[in-house]
Image: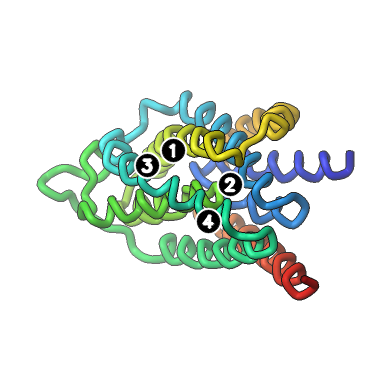
Amino acid sequence: MAQWLLITSVILLASTLQSMTGFGFAVLAVPLLVPILPPRNAVALIAVLSTATTVLAWWRIRAETATGWIGRLFPAGLFGVPLGLVALVSLRADWLRVVVGLSSLAIAGVLLWSHTAPAASGPVDGVPATHDRPRSRRWAVWMAGLASGVLSGGLGMPGPPIMVLLQYAGMSKHTYRATALGYFALIYPVTLLVMLAQGVLSGQTLAESVTYLPAVFGGIVLGNTAHRRVPQRAFTLIVLLLLALAGLLAGWTGFQGLYRG
């Protein structure tokens, strides 16, 4: 029961972040859960719950989505998912914890840079970035999608490359959130199917995920409320601090396991 309550609290917090900002569920939940669950189970569980969170959160704001961005990011993400899953299946548990920890710290640094660096400004070919045509170069969009797919299949965290790309594009707060959620609503089901095919996602994990759905729904409600009230910049800094702490915890747990082994 104590472990269930702890996991439920993590999922409630992560769901709130996801609903409020368009990212944060897996990025925060995975490093917090891998110290207390086998990493493969944690990644599979978060992939299931992330699918529910993103689809539900995106559906009510889908009209604000810049679909052109998703149309170019998603094909690249499809190539990356199987590559990431190879690492998830191949690495031992403690090494996966170390990878999650170091990745979380790196992600926190990249996201901090992306939110402090000036965003791109001005339209390309006369079309603003908030419309359906992405203004970034094709190779940058492709690489962001590919990296997102690898992170989705390997760690259940497809968000960081997408958030950096959309942040640099200078999107408005609402379009930024809706477009990110729309992409995640597509890439997560693909990740689940690949996990099922490779035996990473079990029936037991699917059954357990149902017990955490109330926390997901509660987080969506809280996140939508907070989105209208909390300044984005202040909240982003809080998220990055939590992410850095979660990464340190996951990495430390993994290094301890390697030392004992």
Which numbered mark, 1 or 4, is in the foreground of this view? 4
Give the quadrant of the N terminus.
top right
Quadrant in which residue 209 is drawn? top right
The disc, 1 or 4, on the residue closer to the chain's N-terminal end is: 4
The disc, 3 or 2, on the residue closer to the chain's N-terminal end is: 2
Residues at marks 1 and 4, CA–CA distance in whole angstroms: 18 Å
Give the quadrant of the C terminus.
bottom right
Which numbered mark, 2 or 4, is in the foreground of this view? 4
Which numbered mark, 1 or 3, is in the foreground of this view? 3
Q: Provide the secondary structure element on which disc 1 rests.
A: helix
Location of residue 169 in the rendering, given as x and y in whole percent from the top left corner: 30, 52
In this rendering, the answer to whether 123 lies above or below 187 is below
Amino acid type for the residue under numbered disc 2: Ala
Kindly identify which residue carries mark 4: 87
Q: Provide the secondary structure element on which disc 2 rests.
A: helix
Q: How many other residues sit within 10 Å of disc 4, few (<14), some (14-19) or many (≥20)?
A: some
The disc, 2 or 4, on the residue closer to the chain's N-terminal end is: 2
Q: How many other residues sit within 10 Å of disc 3, few (<14), some (14-19) or many (≥20)?
A: many
Kindly identify which residue carries mark 2: 26
Q: Image check: 178 left or right of 200?
A: left
Kindly identify which residue carries mark 3: 78
Amino acid type for the residue under numbered disc 3: Leu
The disc, 1 or 2, on the residue closer to the chain's N-terminal end is: 2
Q: How many other residues sit within 10 Å of disc 1, few (<14), some (14-19) or many (≥20)?
A: many
Amino acid type for the residue under numbered disc 4: Ala
Residues at marks 3 and 2, CA–CA distance in whole angstroms: 18 Å
Location of residue 140 in the rendering, given as x and y in whole percent from the top left corner: 27, 56
Q: Provide the secondary structure element on which disc 3 rests.
A: helix
Q: Provide the secondary structure element on which disc 4 rests.
A: helix
In this rendering, the answer to whether 130 lies above or below 260 is above
Quadrant in which residue 53 is drawn? top right
